[in-house]
Amino acid sequence: MQDATRILTRHPQNPLLHIKDYPGIAQIYNPSPVQYGDETILLVSVVDYKTERLGRDVGQTRIARSKDGINFELSSENFIKVPENQFPYDKVKHFIDNRVTKIDDTYYIITPVMWDDGYDAPTGMLGKTNDFETYEHIEIITQPKNRGASLFPEKIDGKYWKLDRPGGGDGGDGDIWISSSPDLIHWGCFRPLLKAGYRFWNVQKIGPTPPIKTDEGWLDIVHGVFTPAGGTYYYIGAILLDLEDPTKVIGKTSSPILGSEMPYERNGNCDNVVFPCGAIADYENDQLRLYYGATDSSICLATGSLNEIVQACIDEI
């Protein structure tokens, strides 16, 4: 049996990006990765010490680019921008923790935004880009509270599909649901998929990222939250969904594939946190590149066999 805790190897240059290297930045975390031609692109969550407009610009998304997937150049410009005089976009803020999915030639981005005036949040805001230079907002596509909504990269049975993470916070559990749509805007047929607490490391919450297609099923990298007496701990695991019917869970790792072990994963702005917003599959080299945030202070990389992670989902269910 494959031991999922032994599959991934942390990169020796970790952390790849750290707040100490960016004066004026208070937090840097939770990247959403994508391979764009010969570039690795990360949509990075950033919080400045000083914001342009207090209350709205709490957290922002900036683009980090790399030719080798290791050495990144982080833009100083905010990437996700919405009209400030158009309802409802004049009320949304805190553009972080994106999930990006390529469908055909377009990269769709779901951002779990917060709202002014005390409205319940977050909700998923859908946008898109073709070049990671310009961003186009589309629509708000989830009700609150929904954090971590993630699109599948292709239609299944003629419909678009989305993993949702309603709930969480205020003492409530965070479970994974699934929904479908004819057009990426109007969503329905909501179904429960996986409840938090199937193992100790996701007792409080479990949340999805954009699924990765494999021969055995849709591989989804997930986060889990566990709160023992010593504090809160975030973990990373994986689940496997049926290719033709993604409402069926056909595999999941009993153990996490990554936990907070290194000093940069244990101490920072938010201790004991490793958090994914997606991963890059290198099919030719049988490699999964998992870029993740650590303690809301840095961005790191772990790699391992894609096939072994899939097999661990099958073996450990």
Image (cartoon, helix red, strand yellow):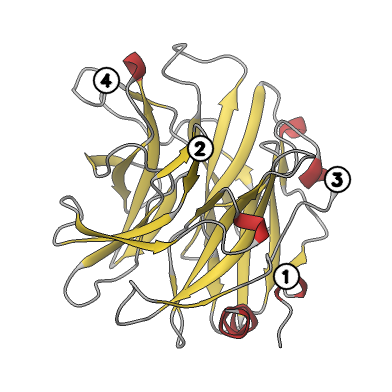
The CA span between labels 3 and 4 is: 40 Å
Pick whichever of labels 2 and 4 is earlier in the sequence.
2
In the rendered image, which residue does mark 4 sit on?
90
- Which kind of residue does numbered mark 1 sit on? Leu
- Which kind of residue does numbered mark 4 sit on? Asp
Pick whichever of labels 2 and 3 is earlier in the sequence.
2
Tell me where residue 308 appears, x and y as whole percent. Answer: 64, 83
- Mark 2 surroundings: few (<14), some (14-19) or many (≥20) residues within 10 A: many
In the rendered image, which residue does mark 2 sit on?
62
Viewer-proximal residue among 121 and 76: 121
In the rendered image, which residue does mark 3 sit on?
263
The CA span between labels 2 and 3 is: 25 Å
Q: Which mark, by number, is residue 8?
A: 1
| Nearer to us: label 2 or label 4 | 4
The CA span between labels 2 and 4 is: 20 Å
Pick whichever of labels 3 and 4 is earlier in the sequence.
4
Pick whichever of labels 1 and 3 is earlier in the sequence.
1
Q: Is residue 126 above or below residue 235?
A: above
Q: Are marks 2 and 1 in contact (CB under 8 Å)?
A: no
The CA span between labels 1 and 4 is: 42 Å
Q: Residue at x 74, y 70 (%)?
A: 5
Q: Residue at x 68, y 44 (%)?
A: 227
- Which kind of residue does numbered mark 2 sit on? Arg
